[in-house]
Amino acid sequence: MSRIRLRYEKLGKVRFLSHRDVARCLERAVRKAGLPVAYSQGFSPRARLHFGLALSTGYESLAEFVDVDLDDAAPAAAGVHVDELPDRLSPCLPVGIVVTAAAPIETSLGSLQESVTSCTWQFDVPGVDPGTLAAAAERLLAAREVPLDLVRKGKQVREDLRPLIVELSTERAADGARLVAELGTKPRSVRPAEFFAALGPLEGDVDIHDARVLRRHQWITDDGARREPLMVADPSPHAQVRAS
């Protein structure tokens, strides 16, 4: 058995598909493209696809990943050319989901969920002055603690988000302001909605539902060096254009 890692984008209207729906789409695409995917054992065999951190419904991404186990003994295995997989798989997926890179990886590598230590998020916030958003970001960075009341398993808990806020920057956007945030994933991921709530009230009562939220990167840290699970060799033609 061998393993390949795929990188894909999720842009445009397809952002309203849930993580589970996207997983089903990818399973169907793998079968439709004729890849000799390996299956689990047992009463109800499933295609051996290993997904990374879930992307919440309504958010877009330039950096989603899935690992696919292949059955090397299958007759179709000889016809698998990794560099051709993006073009082979993308037509089998819904509009807005595009495979941008593929590469073989060792099966001994840790899972994506275990390996990713932080994510870079982009928040495009309409109708907000960049200075106002920059001030809110500076307050978070200067705070010793960022307490947030959450409900976990039916219980009210208070957590400190400050250790998971790695880096923040702001800039002017076409119709408002843009905030770029690197947020940690250990011991748990910071949800974009939680982070946005921690910014505090913004002008015009803007909330997370008014913002365009885009995951730009996922990061793995090895011996102090940071890298992505799989780089894109060439800039994606979809990187700056939202799919329709």
Image (cartoon, grey):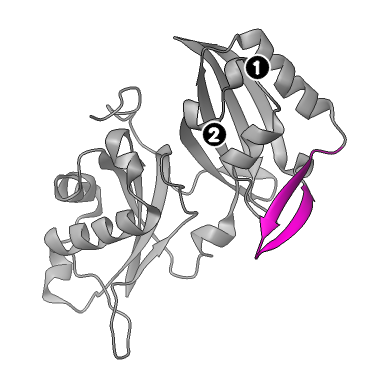
Q: Find the magenta span and give its range.
A: 145-159
Vertical order, 96 against 180 (above or below): below
Q: Residue 121: which numbered mark, if any?
A: 2
Front position in the image: 202 or 19: 202
Of circles 1 and 2, the one toward us is 1
* Residue 138 position within the rendered picture, expressed as x and y whole percent measured from the top left: 76, 21
Q: What kind of element bears circle 2?
A: strand
Q: Is residue 211 visible?
A: no
| Quadrant placement of the N terminus | bottom left
Q: CA distance from mark 1 to mark 2?
A: 15 Å
Which residue is located at x 78 percent, y 50 percent? 159
| Quadrant placement of the C terminus | top left
Label 1 neighbourhood size at 10 Å, few (<14), some (14-19), many (20+)?
Answer: many
Residue at the bottom extreme? 43
Give residue 107's quadrant in the image: bottom left
Say how many tags the image has. 2
* Residue 38 position within the rendered picture, expressed as x and y whole percent measured from the top left: 27, 75
Q: What type is the residue that disc 1 sits on?
A: Leu
| Between discs 1 and 2, the one toward the N terminus | 2
The chief SS type of the magenta part is strand
The question of residue 89 being in magenta is answered with no
Which residue is located at x 84 percent, y 26 percent? 142
Vertical order, 165 against 199 (above or below): below
Vertical order, 205 against 81 (above or below): above
The residue that label 1 is drawn on is 133
Give residue 242's quadrant in the image: top left
Vertical order, 219 against 198 (above or below): below
Q: Is residue 27 left or right of residue 33?
A: right
Which residue is located at x 19 percent, y 57 percent? 29
Q: Is residue 2 visible?
A: yes
Give residue 115's quadrant in the image: bottom right
The question of residue 156 being in magenta is answered with yes
